[in-house]
Image (cartoon, rainbow, N blue to C red):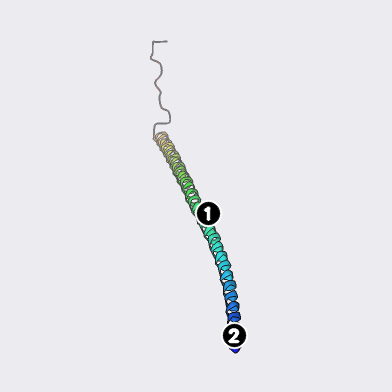
Amino acid sequence: MAWGDSVRGLASELKKLNDEFVETKTKFGMLKERVVENLDQFKAIVEKTAEKMEQMEKEHIRERADLNAKIDSLSARLDSLSEQALHAAVHEAADRIARERLENRERSINDSPGTDQIDAPGPPEGRH
């Protein structure tokens, strides 16, 4: 009976090993499913993040283009205002120089000898 007991003991050990194998295989399968689920969730998060980053980059490019357009507009406006100010300053300087020359000419005419009384032509005689 020793041989029969040995076979029964061996069968019992094989059953325990098979049960452990089935349990381990089941746990491994469940763990694999969780890993696949987690990887799918992670992949979805990465894709969503990539989409958001792409959208943010497009928005950044659009905002930058808007700002550059505003800068260009303000720069053109500043150039125009500067040119207007320059023209006004040149005009004012030309007026001042013309007035000074006119005043100097009048002064030099008035300061010339014999020009204290300048005879202005009157009405022709005999025609009243």
Q: Nearer the viewer, residue 122 or 42?
A: 42
| Numbered tag placed on residue 25 in the rendering | none
Q: Image point 54% across, 61% down: which residue?
A: 42
Decide which of tag 2 and tag 1 comes sooner along the chain.
2
Mark 2 burial class by Cα count in 10 Å: few <14, some 14-19, many 20+? few
Amino acid tagged 2 = Gly
Residue 120 in the image: above or below residue 82: above
Q: Nearer the viewer, residue 101 or 38?
A: 38
Residue 15 in the image: above or below residue 96: below
Q: Image point 46% across, 48% down: which residue?
A: 65
* Quadrant position of the N terminus in the picture: bottom right
Q: Which element carries disc 2, helix, strand or loop?
A: helix
Q: Nearer the viewer, residue 81 or 105?
A: 81
Residue 43 in the image: above or below residue 99: below
Q: Position of residue 113 (x, y in %)?
A: 39, 34
Q: Nearer the viewer, residue 31 or 66?
A: 31
The mark closer to the camera, 2 or 1, is 2
Quadrant position of residue 76: top left
Q: Which residue is identified by label 2?
A: 4
Q: Which residue is identified by label 1?
A: 52
Amino acid tagged 1 = Lys
Q: Position of residue 81 (x, y in %)?
A: 47, 42
Quadrant position of residue 7: bottom right
Q: Which element carries disc 1, helix, strand or loop?
A: helix
Q: Position of residue 47 (x, y in %)?
A: 51, 57
Q: Image point 39% across, 21% down: which residue?
A: 121
Q: Position of residue 83 (x, y in %)?
A: 43, 42
